[in-house]
Image: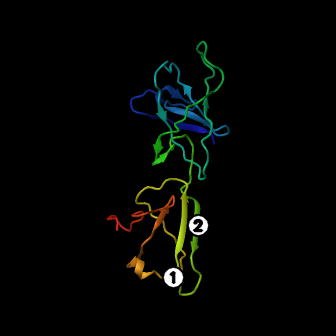
Amino acid sequence: ADGDVVLSDVGAYPGPSLFCTISGGGGKARWEGSTASLVLSLCDSAELEAFTDHMFVFSVTNPDARQDSPSVSIEATGGLMPVGMPVGKDSMVKDTTSAVSNIVGGGEVLWVIVRDFTTSEIAQTSPIASAANEIRITLVGSQEFKAEVSFTITGLVESIIDTATAVGDVLTINVTESGSVVTDFFCTDAAGT
């Protein structure tokens, strides 16, 4: 849907107060839903100074499905255009290196990921009744998960914990990463036990 978008300051940089919308009030831009465009119109007597950083932010809600970062461009039209001002669209430079939410490249505009697993497989070493059995889990995340994240695997009905490899109801788990066994990968409390 179309509508006005509130622009907010970034530190002491000039920005939001330069722009107005037809519906009135400075510090706003016009959102055109049909073209997914943000229209920034300079207020009467306002001027975007040359060789000066102008910064502002506005809020959106990301889609609920993963998507690649789209191509984003900017162009200037109407008003008293400076001599030599390009008429065509200029591609905007996107931040592809910053880590946002612990995700490298997470600053790339409207690149959206879903917190899930690209692979989540489970297998066993024995189907024989009353036999010892090893459950093997394979997980590949769509992003890097940091310390203190917990994964819960449900539905393991009628399984009996091997008391030789458990303390209470806590299993000892060996994790293999790139062919090598990794120790101290999972913990059951903040003390690391």
- Residue at 42%, 72% (x, y): give it: 172
| Disc 2 packing (10 Å; few <14; some 14–19; many ≥20) | few
Q: In the displayed image of the protein, which residue is found farthest to the bottom?
A: 130
The quarter of the image holding the N terminus is top right
Left-right relation of 167 to 54: left
Residue 23 percent location from the top left of the image? 57, 32
Residue furthest to the right in view is: 34
Please name the residue that numbered disc 2 is placed on.
121
Q: Residue furthest left?
A: 191
In the picture, measured across the screen, residue 36 lies left or right of residue 188, that is: right
Residue 5 x/y as whole percent: 54, 37
Q: Distance between the residues labelled 2 and 1?
A: 20 Å
Q: Residue furthest front?
A: 179
Query: Would you identify the image quadrant in which residue 169 lies?
Result: bottom left
Position of the C terminus by quadrant:
bottom left
**In the depicted structure, whether residue 12 falls above or below residue 126:** above
Front residue (pair 125, 104): 125
**Residue carrying label 1:** 132
Q: Nearer the viewer, residue 63 or 9?
A: 63
Name the residue type under label 2: Glu
Which of the numbered marks, if any, corresponds to residue 4? none
Question: Mark 1 falls on what kind of element?
Answer: loop
